[in-house]
Amino acid sequence: MPTLEGSVLVKGTPEALFWFSQDYDQRLVWDKYLGVARLEHGATQAAKGVEAYCESRKGIGMTVRYISFHPPTQVAMEMTKGPWLFRKFSGSWRFKPEKEELTRVYFRYNFQVRFAGLILNPFINWLLHADIKNRLKYFKEAVEAGVLQA
């Protein structure tokens, strides 16, 4: 299964950054890729077993279930319902302290498409890599702009 990952150095503690990344009340404030982000079935906080629905501004939606939840270092989700193109899809966030008040934030996708294609696969990789890069950029910009209050 292909894996794509990016990282960025962000000012803040792993704990503060972890909870900010998983706060669905704040998600649309910083994540410019998404038009919809909500927890499902009455959940009020992300946790293992909780489902979330996210939809891009282009109308592509996916329901995911949290399969790992380890504050303040790591969280992972897997697709339960989403675009037909993907047989499997999962994502994760990791937070690793680097220097005083600086944390390396990692964002990763793992996926498997329903059919292989020499032309389509590089395009999917490019799109998902761009999404990772932009999502990390939006996250860092929001934190640096003071959206995350210490």
Image: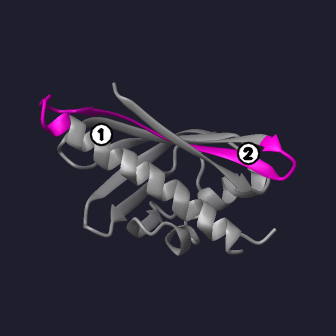
Give the left or right position of residue 13, taking residue 62 as reference. Answer: right
Query: Does 79 appear in magenta?
Result: no
Task: Nearest to the eye among marks 2 and 1: give it.
Answer: 1
Quarter of image, res 118: top left
Residue range highlighted in magenta: 98-121
Q: Residue at 45%, 49% (x, y): give it.
A: 132
At label 1, counting other C-alpha atoms closer than 10 Å, the crowd grade (few under 14, some 14-19, many 20 or more) is: some
**In front: 36, or 118?**
118
Quarter of image, res 32: bottom left
Residue under label 1, please give it: 125
Image x and y of residue 142, in percent: 62, 69
Q: Residue at 49%, 72% (x, y): give it.
A: 28
Quarter of image, res 30: bottom right
Q: What label sits on residue 72 in the rendered view? A: 2
Image x and y of residue 6, in percent: 51, 42
Q: Secondary structure at mark 2?
A: loop
Q: Secondary structure at mark 1?
A: helix
**In front: 83, or 32?**
32
Image x and y of residue 54, in percent: 39, 60
Spatial separation of the CA atoms under disc 2 and disc 1: 29 Å
Q: Determine whether 16 is above or below 36 in the image.
A: above
Dots 2, 1 in contact, CB < 8 A: no
Q: Amino acid at mark 1?
A: Asn
